[in-house]
Image (cartoon, grey):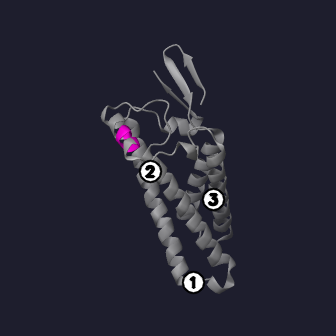
Amino acid sequence: MKSTNTGKQTTVRIWDPLIRIVHWTLVAVFIANYFFLEPGSQWHQWLGYIAVTAILVRIVWGFIDSGYGSFQRIDLSRQALRKHLNHLKERKIPVKSGHNPVGWLMIFAVILLFLGLGVTGFLMEEVDALFGNPTLELIHGWLADTLYGAALIHVAAVVIVGWRGRIQLIRPMLTGKRSKS
C-alpha cells in the first residue's frame, strides 16, 4: 500500500499484480467458456481448470497478502456498510480503500460459483458414471448463468459506485494504482 504524492496528486497502490492477474484471468476464462467455446470441449475443460487454479491461488493469496486483497480486511458489519453508504451519500469514497462489504460478498459469491462450476464440470467429464448426467448438467448451467448475472451486477456496481463515490475503480484493476487530486 505504497503511496506517493506528486504535487497535488496522490497515487496509492490498491491492487497488486497477482490480484489483477487472477481477476482478468477469470474474466477471460468466463467470457470464452460462456460465450464462445462448446461446452465439454477440450478447450472449455482446460480453461475451467485454469479458472479453478486461479480461484485457489486467490484464496491462498487472501491469507498471505497484507494489502487491500487480504481476507484480514474483510468487514461485513452493519457499521462498515453504513460507513460505505455514507461515503456514497457524501460522494466521497476514500482513495485508500479496497472492497466495501458488498464487494466482499461478491468476491465470495464468485469464488463459490467458480468452484461449483469446476466441481460439476469435473464430475461430468471425468467420472464415467456421471457423464451426461442431466441433473449435473442443469446445475452446471445454472451456476454459469448465475455467474453471468453476478458479473453483470459487478460491472454495474463498479460503474455506479465509481461515479457516485467519485473514485477510480477500473484504473486500479488495470494498473494497480489509484490517484486522486
Which one is nearer the viewer's eye here, 3 or 133?
3
Q: Looking at the picture, which amino acid does disc 1 mark?
A: Asn
Q: Earlier in the sequence, mark 2 or mark 1?
A: 1
Q: Quick check: can you spot residue 99?
A: yes
Secondary element under disc 3, as helix, strand or loop, is helix
* Residue 88 percent across, percent down from the top left: 34, 37
**121 relative to 134 in the view: left or right:** right
Q: Which residue is situated farthest in the bottom direction here?
A: 129
The residue located at (52%, 35%) in the rendering is 171
Magenta-highlighted residues: 80-84
Q: Quick check: can you spot residue 37?
A: no
What distance separates the C-alpha of mark 1 from that of mark 3?
A: 23 Å
Q: Earlier in the sequence, mark 1 or mark 3?
A: 3
Residue 127 figure quarter: bottom right
* Residue 67 percent across, percent down from the top left: 59, 37
Was residue 111 drawn as part of the magenta stretch in this picture? no
Q: Earlier in the sequence, mark 2 or mark 3?
A: 3
Count residues near mark 1 (Cα–Cα under 10 Å), then give few for <14, some for 14-19, many for 20+. few
The residue at which mark 3 appears reads as 51
Which one is nearer the viewer's eye here, 63 or 31?
63
The residue at which mark 1 appears reads as 133
The residue at which mark 2 appears reads as 154
Which one is nearer the viewer's eye here, 97 or 37?
97
The residue located at (55%, 78%) in the rendering is 136
Secondary element under disc 2, as helix, strand or loop, is helix
The residue located at (51%, 81%) in the rendering is 135
Q: Looking at the picture, which amino acid does disc 3 mark?
A: Ala
